[in-house]
Amino acid sequence: MPRLVATLGGLGLVPVAPGTVASLVAVLAYFLLYQISPYVPLLFLFFLTPIAVWGSGKFEASMNRQDPPEIVVDEWVGQFICFIGVEPSPSALVAGFFLFRIFDIIKLPPVRRLEDFPGGVGIVADDVAAGIFGWAVLYGLSYIGVV
């Protein structure tokens, strides 16, 4: 079960850029869940985050490697955080995807230190931070009407 959670049902096993692929699928999932209600993605995130921490930690331990690239559930957590409170227009979805990926890759200080937390907390925490940075920029762009 932890493998299924951590890899999002095998999505993390794609051979090229599994984190980017998972983020793209998360954008689609956010859009679809938002169509049900603007609150559904937030509720989904509320339940997904502790499950992501658990599954990532257990899978990492079973692999005996720190933060293996197959773990992509953390991308969903960060990507969903990036979109909180933003209506998913096409431009907002594209901007949010790129903002989250950029902040996830560059890891502004002190984000990289969050990876030092043990197990699943360390795996998910840096993506939470990247999602928060992305959200701040995306929300600002949305507020001024750019996206």
Image (cartoon, helix red, strand yellow):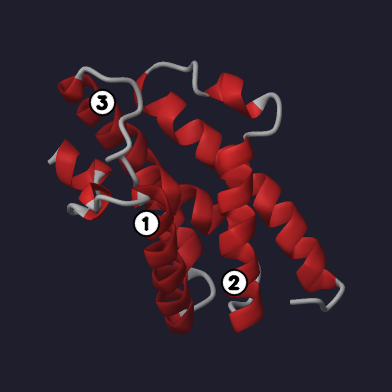
Let me know if residue 83 appears in the view.
no
Q: Position of residue 109 (x, y in %)?
A: 71, 26
- The residue carrying mark 2 is 94
Q: Quadrant of residue 84?
A: bottom right
Foreground pick, 16 / 99: 16
- The three-letter code of the residue at mark 1 reads Ala
Q: Which numbered disc, 1 or 2, marks the residue that appears first in the sequence?
A: 1
* Above or below 25: residue 128: above
Foreground label between 3 and 2: 2
Q: Amino acid at mark 3?
A: Glu
Mark 1 residue crowding within 10 angstroms, few (<14) / some (14–19) / many (20+):
many
The circle drawn on residue 60 is 3
| Local secondary structure at mark 3 | helix
- Residue 119 in percent (x, y) is at 35, 21
Q: Residues within 10 Å of mark 2 (few under 14, many from 20)?
A: some
Sequence-wise, which precedes: disc 1 or disc 3?
Answer: 1
Residue on which disc 1 sits: 22
* Residue at x 63%, y 28% (from the top left corner): 111
Residue at the farthest front position:
16
For the residues labelled 1 and 2, the Cα–Cα distance comes to 14 Å
Q: Is residue 85 above or below residue 12?
A: below
- Please tell me in which quadrant of the rendered image residue 124 appears: top left
Tell whether 63 sits left or right of 74. left
Secondary structure under badge 1? Answer: helix
Mark closest to the chain's N terminus, 3 or 2: 3
Q: Is residue 18 visible?
A: yes
